[in-house]
Amino acid sequence: MQRIVLSAALLCAVFVGTGCYRYAVKVGSGGDLDDKPTRSEWTHHFIAGAVGDEVIDVSSVCPSGNATVKIERNVIDAVLGNIVGNVLWQPSTVEVYCGDGRTAALTLDDESGPRFAKSEAFADAVAEMAPSELPVVLAYQAQ
């Protein structure tokens, strides 16, 4: 009987000391939290959070500049942290959800296509959305 009471008390202590949280940070127009995350990783903090500086470059994960970053400490993270006393190690989960960015449809014919490809507006759009392709566009426009 003592073992059952001791086990129940230990189990209660693990869950009572469990702190869960969740928050999200929206960048640009954000990303859809109902979609699958573009990136998901476990972050680690040590010595009551004093050590551990996780950095996720959202602009490299979501080139459109639109993302929602969700940071949470779920039950699994909290229980695992409690097992080691939360002072030594505190895990959390970070997920990045990318937005689609801007999209557009454009219909061009044989006459308007080349004219558009040589326009300054086209070069500006390429410079913003696909800068690595800009030299190709500028070479074409110089012809």
Image (cartoon, helix red, strand yellow):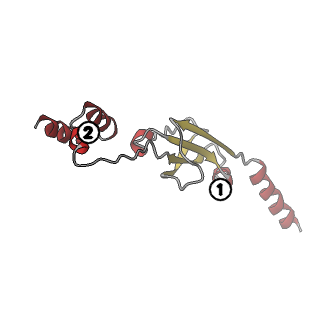
Residue 83 in which image quadrant: bottom right
* Left or right, 3 with reference to 32: right
Residue, far right: 1
Query: Which residue bears the numbered disc 2?
Result: 116
Give the SS element for disc 2. helix
Residue for point 14% across, 38% down:
139
User: Which residue type does callout 1 highlight?
Assistant: Ile
Disc 2 marks a residue whose amino acid type is Phe
Residue at the spot x=32%, y=36% of the render? 125
In front of the other: label 1 or label 2? 2
Asked if residue 37 is positioned above or below residue 121 in the image, the reply reads below
Q: Is residue 61 placed above or below 128 in the rendered structure? A: below
User: Which residue is pictured at 39% across the width and 47% down the height?
Assistant: 105
Quarter of the image with the C terminus in it: top left
Left or right: 32 in relation to 113: right
Mark 2 nearby-residue class (10 Å; few <14, some 14–19, many ≥20):
few
Q: Mark 1 points at which residue?
A: 76
